[in-house]
């Protein structure tokens, strides 16, 4: 198993209603810096995205941003990152973020966050990569989504192995520990299979 060197964090470009969300971003940042794990994220200075990057940098860690030109031009990019990659499109951005990271976590966020974590989870279920994907369920933010995903599994639109590929934890340290011991299922055996 490859050691976790870089973690991709998807999260809100807004701060959300509760201070708990930004606080959890800072706790995650600190858990990452303690373990020498580099942050890969969307490169913005706003919302929870800014909180996680600011804290990684404040603690002396590495924060790598990947931002499309169109958002760069709107001056949303963080000015103090260790590295900033500017891509021609959103698709190129997501591909590069996925390549640069050894695992993917969604903190609370909105549509962009949902889309990003679902995309890498989809790539995982197809066996395009074997990296762990997870939700950091801060203050119960993802409770409704987790119940729905369990419902999708019990209705047999999501296979149990696919559902288990998405790790859900409330504490950043627990999530990183589970990522470190994650082994992807042997996908080719069950892709397209009917029996659970
Ligand atoms: P959202 O959850 O809708 O706030 O979108 C946040 C996610 O989408 C982040 O993980 C980013 O990769 C991307 N994103 C959305 N808005 C921005 C922005 N203004 N600047 C940079 N990335 C953004």
Image (tube, rainbow, N blue to C red):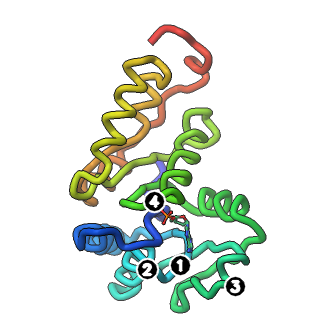
Question: Is residue 116 rendered to the left or right of residue 72?
Answer: left
- Return the disc, 2 or 1, that comes first in the chain's sequence: 1
Residue 83, how many percent across, how many down? 59, 82
- Return the disc, 4 or 2, that comes first in the chain's sequence: 2
Tell me if the residue at label 1 has its CB under 8 Å from ligand 1: yes
Vertical relation: 194 (above or below) 117: above
* Real-space CA distance between mark 4 and mark 3, rounded to the nearest whole angstrom: 22 Å
Residue tagged 4 = 110
Decide if residue 81 is in sight here. Answer: yes
Decide if residue 34 is in sight here. Answer: no
Q: Residue at x 37, y 34 (%)?
A: 148
As rendered, which of 174 and 192 lies closer to the eye?
A: 192
- Return the disc, 4 or 1, that comes first in the chain's sequence: 1
Residue tagged 2 = 50
* Real-space CA distance between mark 4 and mark 1, rounded to the nearest whole angstrom: 15 Å
As rendered, which of 110 and 77 lies closer to the eye?
A: 110
* Numbered circle sitting on residue 73: 3
Q: Residue at x 23, y 57 (%)?
A: 171
Q: Residue at x 24, y 69 (%)?
A: 18
């Amino acid at each position: 198993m490859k050691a976790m060197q870089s973690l991709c964090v998807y999260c809100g470009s807004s701060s959300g209603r509760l201070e708990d969300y930004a606080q959890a971003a800072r706790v995650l940042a600190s858990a990452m810096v303690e373990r020498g794990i580099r942050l890969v994220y969307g490169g913005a200075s706003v919302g929870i995205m800014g909180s996680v990057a600011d804290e990684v940098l404040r603690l002396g860690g590495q924060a790598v941003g990947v931002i499309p030109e169109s958002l760069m031009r709107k001056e949303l990019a963080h000015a103090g990152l260790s590295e900033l990659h500017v891509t021609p499109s959103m698709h190129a951005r997501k591909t590069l973020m996925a390549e640069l990271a050894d695992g993917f976590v969604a903190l609370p966020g909105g549509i962009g966050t949902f889309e990003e974590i679902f995309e890498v989870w989809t790539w995982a279920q197809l066996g395009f990569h074997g990296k762990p994907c997870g939700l950091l369920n801060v203050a119960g933010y993802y409770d409704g989504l987790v119940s729905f995903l369990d419902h999708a599994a019990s209705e047999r639109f999501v296979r149990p192995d696919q559902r288990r590929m998405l790790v859900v934890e409330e504490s950043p340290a627990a999530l990183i520990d589970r990522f470190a011991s994650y082994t992807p299922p042997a996908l080719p055996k069950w892709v397209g299979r009917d029996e659970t």
